[in-house]
Image (cartoon, rainbow, N blue to C red):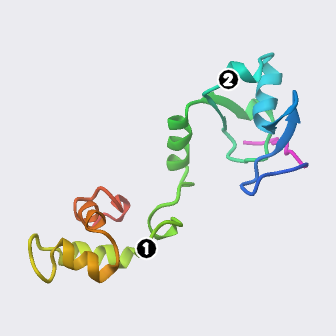
């Protein structure tokens, strides 16, 4: 996508432009979206303005579309922008440790059961359960 128009004033740490508009701080791309369409901010309450260009400071109305949080999350996943695995700031485990947990796990085993692995790897039993049942770390394919 070409011809992004970037906001060059204040930006959030994630790169989104912010500006004061109608007495309140707003994301610059939301203001650009509503101004271009003759709407008010209240008309898009509960919706997100998504960047088709994947460029957070862009305020080009042609690059912006209205959607839901689910649409935005799907965009992030489809475009490879969501953090997964050890890249997540909340992760305590590496991909290698998760693979080891899955390979060693034996239900109700004193050495390789959920409680033992949870103690060994410093996580909760529920985390072990989610890993072995592939409800977490699903992208590994092991």
Q: Is residue 46 magenta?
A: no
Q: Is residue 5 magenta?
A: yes
Relative to 7, say whether 129 is above or below. below
Mark found first going from the N terminus, 2 or 1: 2
Give the percent coordinates (x, y) of residue 85: 44, 66
Alpha carbons under labels 2 and 1: distance apart: 38 Å
Relative to 80, say whether 98 is above or below. below
Quick one: quadrant of the C terminus?
bottom left
Predominant secondary structure, magenta span = loop
Residue 44, numbered label: 2
- Residue for point 11% across, 81% down: 110
Magenta segment: 1-8
- Residue for point 71% across, 21% down: 42
Q: Nearer the viewer, residue 6 or 42?
A: 42
Q: Within 10 Å of the Cα at label 2, are there few (<14), some (14-19), or many (20+) other Cα atoms?
A: some
Q: Is residue 50 left or right of residue 76?
A: right
Give the percent coordinates (x, y) of residue 9: 91, 48
Q: Describe the element under mark 2 as helix, strand or loop.
A: helix
């Amino acid at each position: 996508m070409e011809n992004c128009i970037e906001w060059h004033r204040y930006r959030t740490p994630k790169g989104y432009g912010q500006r004061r508009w109608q007495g309140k701080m707003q994301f610059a791309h939301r203001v650009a979206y509503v101004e271009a369409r003759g709407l008010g901010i209240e008309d898009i309450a509960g919706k997100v303005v998504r960047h088709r260009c994947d460029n957070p400071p862009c305020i080009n109305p042609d690059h912006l579309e209205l959607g839901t949080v689910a649409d935005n999350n799907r965009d992030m996943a489809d475009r490879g922008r969501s953090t997964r695995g050890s890249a997540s700031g909340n992760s305590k485990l590496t991909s290698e440790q998760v693979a080891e947990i899955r390979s060693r796990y034996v239900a109700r085993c004193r050495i390789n059961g959920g409680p033992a692995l949870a103690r060994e790897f410093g996580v909760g039993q529920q985390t072990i359960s989610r890993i072995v049942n592939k409800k977490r770390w699903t992208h590994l394919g092991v």
